[in-house]
Image (cartoon, rainbow, N blue to C red):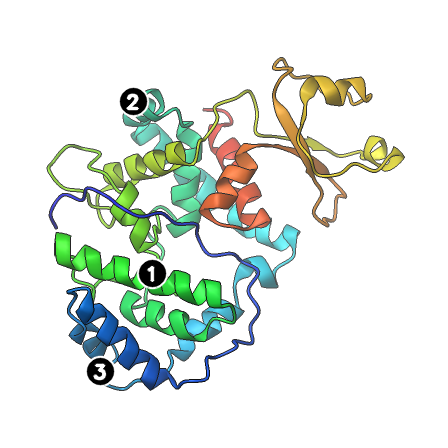
């Protein structure tokens, strides 16, 4: 695959989809015909859709099932976090942090992104490249461009399908053999096709960008994407309160306030950076913990629009960095 120099933007798929898809009035087969015509008009090869579906134009039910069974929707906060912070994931994250430490520090200097966050995202997206990714991106994106219940999301997946064809046209990516998530995300860092175009980079300077098999390219691409999302290096990204008496005394909204402001309100918050902004995150949990999260929580939600996912990234990063 030739070196990728990139174009187009994304926000990964929200975890809060309705399962019942408001299918358009025209049939899926008619949808395919319209897509193929538009692809041809844009000088892409529409036959890839025929080959991906093996000329059997029925909805990919596995994609619909995966949409319904997203862990961010089905699981409680405690169950979700228990899985994401499993011992094996923390241990391997620490091992890979050590293995790539010098390279990660170079990325930190260049992109201003904390090394442990880069590794944590890698670990949560694909278990550091070991998670079995089984879907065909052409089928997945075509299916989602028809079956999603919101027109804005159908348009989004259609645009991602065209970005996938752009990857094939410019960089010879074999889009029939390449595997993706159910939503069409690619590689070990699970970039949507438009993000591959824009943010995947050549980390080890071997003349190509490979987020499928090259760990350094994966790490560098994650750092590049987070920089574009305006990641902030700061003292902490979240603080845990086991006793939430303070928060029960008065109602707080979810706006960000500086450490100094929290302290003036009476919260015992021992942080040096008085200008660091934090807001309440209070998911239902067995320990009744309350968290104050930094603005980086919102940054991760631009990567994947899920509170659970965002907090799991911050938590895994913290575990990876502990005792290092």
Q: Is residue 33 left or right of residue 73?
A: left
Label pair 3/2, CB-CB below 8 angstroms: no
Identity of the residue drawn at 41% across and 72% down: 63
Locate residue 238: give its quadrant.
top right
The residue at 22%/69% (across/down) is 39
The answer to whether residue 125 shows anywhere in this view is: yes
Q: For mark 1, give the secondary structure.
A: helix
Q: Which residue is mark 2?
A: 106
Label placed on residue 98:
none
**In this rendering, does residue 183 appear at all?**
no
Mark 1 crowdedness (10 Å alpha carbons): few <14, some 14-19, many ≥20 = some
Categorize mark 3 by other alpha carbons within 10 Å: few (<14), some (14-19), many (20+).
few
How busy is the neighbourhood of tag 2: few (under 14 within 10 Å), some, or many (20 plus)? few
Image point (24%, 50%), residue name: 212
Disc 3 on helix, strand or loop?
Answer: loop
**Horizontal relation, residue 28 to residue 213: left or right:** right
Badge 2 vs badge 1, beta-carbon distance below 8 Å? no
Secondary structure category for the residue under label 2: helix
Q: Is residue 21 above or below residue 221?
A: below
Query: Residue placed at 34% from the left, 26% from the top?
Result: 111
Residue position for label 1? 159
Q: Earlier in the sequence, mark 3 or mark 2?
A: 3
Q: Position of residue 91 (x, y in %)?
A: 44, 39
Task: Point out the frontmost of discs 3 and 2.
Answer: 3
Residue 48 percent across, percent down from the top left: 18, 72
Q: CA distance from mark 2 to mark 1?
A: 34 Å
Q: Nearer the viewer, residue 200 or 89?
A: 200
Q: Earlier in the sequence, mark 3 or mark 1?
A: 3
Report how far apart the C-alphas of labels 3 and 1 lie in the structure.
22 Å
Who is closer to the viewer here, 24 or 126? 24
């Amino acid at each position: 695959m030739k070196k990728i120099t990139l174009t187009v933007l994304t926000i990964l798929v929200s975890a809060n989809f309705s399962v019942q898809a408001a299918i358009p009035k025209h049939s899926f087969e008619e949808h395919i015909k319209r897509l193929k015509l538009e692809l041809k008009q844009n000088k892409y090869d529409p036959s890839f859709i025929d080959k991906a579906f093996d000329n059997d134009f029925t909805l990919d039910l596995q994609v619909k099932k995966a949409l319904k069974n997203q862990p961010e929707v089905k699981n409680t906060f405690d169950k979700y976090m228990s899985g994401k912070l499993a011992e094996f994931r923390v241990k391997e994250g620490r091992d890979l942090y050590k293995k790539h430490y010098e390279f990660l520090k170079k990325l930190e200097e260049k992109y201003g992104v904390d090394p442990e966050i880069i590794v944590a995202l890698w670990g949560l997206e694909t278990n550091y490249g070991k998670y079995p990714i089984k879907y065909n991106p052409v089928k997945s994106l075509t299916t989602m461009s028809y079956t999603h219940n919101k027109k804005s999301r159908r348009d989004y997946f259609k645009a991602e399908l065209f970005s996938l064809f752009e990857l094939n046209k410019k960089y010879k990516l074999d889009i029939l053999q390449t595997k993706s998530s159910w939503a069409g995300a690619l590689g070990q860092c699970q970039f949507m096709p438009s993000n591959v175009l824009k943010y995947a980079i050549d980390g080890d300077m071997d003349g190509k960008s490979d987020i499928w098999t090259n760990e350094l390219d994966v790490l560098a691409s994650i750092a590049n994407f987070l920089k574009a999302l305006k990641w902030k290096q700061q003292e902490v990204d979240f603080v845990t309160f086991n006793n939430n008496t303070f928060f029960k005394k008065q109602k707080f909204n979810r706006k960000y306030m500086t450490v100094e402001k929290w302290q003036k309100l009476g919260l015992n918050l021992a942080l040096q950076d008085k200008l660091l902004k934090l807001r309440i995150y209070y998911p239902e949990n067995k320990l009744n913990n309350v968290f104050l999260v930094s603005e980086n929580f919102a940054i991760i939600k631009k990567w994947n629009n899920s509170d659970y996912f965002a907090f799991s990234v911050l938590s895994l990063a913290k575990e990876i960095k502990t005792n290092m």
